[in-house]
Amino acid sequence: TDVSLPINLWEYEQLAKQHLSQMAFDYYSSGAWDEITLRDNRAAFERVKLRPRMLVDVSDRNLSTSILGQSLQLPLLIAPMAFQCLAHPQGELATALAAATAGVGMVLSTMATKNLEEVAAVGYKHNALQWFQLYIHKDRGLTRNLVERAYAAGYQALCVTVDAPILGRRERDVRNTFSLPPGLQLANITNISGLNIPQESAESGLFTYFAQQLNPAVTWHDLEWLQSLSPLPLVLKGILRADDAVRAVEHGAKAIVVSNHGGRQLDGAIASLDALAEIVAAVDNQAEVLVDGGIRRGTDILKALALGAKAVLIGRPVLWGLAVAGQVGVSHIISLLQDELSIAMALSGCTSIQDIDPSLVTFKH
Ligand code: FNR
């Protein structure tokens, strides 16, 4: 049989399906309710057209950039995603090693299945960009503990996810009564608090965990408290409106991730790419703006950067890489995107990330 490696991220998704339990594949791939936003994240990229420049010497191309002062080999970070050990025994450690060796960033989820200190050690060795994603629990002591540990471990920013006061309803997880298989736990939480994803739940165990443990009362006022816990800069993930972005800047956010959580929270929410331009304009260089949701090709990165993003995050494709081949799979996913971005830049007359400007895109069709 043919075991040649996949040649793009779509092939990784197809192959990953064969490596994952139904429950894990459903958890990874699904969106909320009718998955309108999940599909629209992709459709938004297809609506944007490129306006390539010709007759530019593109023999040498430089894809490097920097985010919050940290250099990257390409404008790419791995989005925070829970439960990566469902895909591969090395889970978040494999992802961290792949990201660090490729010179891309990684955001570690609060809901990781490897502990944050071990993951940080991988990044530290390679001088990698690593941020810690925070879910704010009702238990303030637990939340404080996570922030203090993230700072002590060497994470360079606190990425606060603001689009999940409660969990969106992903009906495939309801149907499967999603839970973690024996042996997997919340590596950063269970040890210190005994809390874990319930095994016996009438619906998604993750939904139940959120409803019981996360604080749905968090507002802008709590950002001050978060900032008092450590010197880490704040990144707000999940902003979809210009006025919220301005507020984020006023409250001291150093970066914003324009995101609808990969279509997993409010179904019907605007595609993240469609929200990008107004947010970039409103933020007016007072913070760095990143975007995620539906990025599957180098041309998607080009489009997002042309619309004003400083970098992009990828989610699910990393899980597909992990499921197929662990660290090697994640490394391959990253190098596929790197190659595609390099080709797309050449074909549109860009030799550096700075060359990617708004005139490269149009919504005309
Ligand atoms: C996520 N996402 C997410 N976000 C977050 O802030 N904390 C988390 O723990 C998780 N967990 C998570 C698990 C899984 C399985 C997925 C697919 C996503 C959202 C993630 O960071 C990101 O916003 C989206 O995944 C980006 O969209 P794409 O690239 O998956 O289309």
Image (tube, helix red, strand yellow):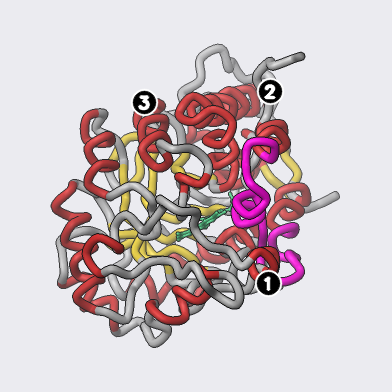
How far from the left and from the top, in percent, is residue 113? 38, 50
Dots 3, 2 in contact, CB < 8 A = no
> For disc 1, does the CB lie below 8 Å from ligand 1?
no
Label located before the other in sequence (3 or 2): 2
Query: Is 266 on the left-hand or right-hand side of 190?
Result: right
* Marking on residue 332: none
**Helix, strand or loop for disc 3:** helix
Whether 358 is drawn above or below 180: the answer is above
> For disc 2, does the CB lie below 8 Å from ligand 1?
no
Q: In this picture, which residue range is highlighted in magenta?
A: 17-40
Q: In whole angstroms, how far apart are the C-alphas of marks 3 and 2? A: 21 Å
Front-lying residue, 350 or 176: 176
Question: Residue shown at 56%/36% (left/top)?
Answer: 323
Disc 1 marks which residue? 267
How far from the left and from the top, in percent, is residue 79? 47, 49
Q: In whole angstroms, how far apart are the C-alphas of marks 1 and 2? A: 31 Å
Label located before the other in sequence (1 or 3): 3
**Helix, strand or loop for disc 1:** loop
* Marking on residue 101: 3
Disc 2 marks which residue? 7
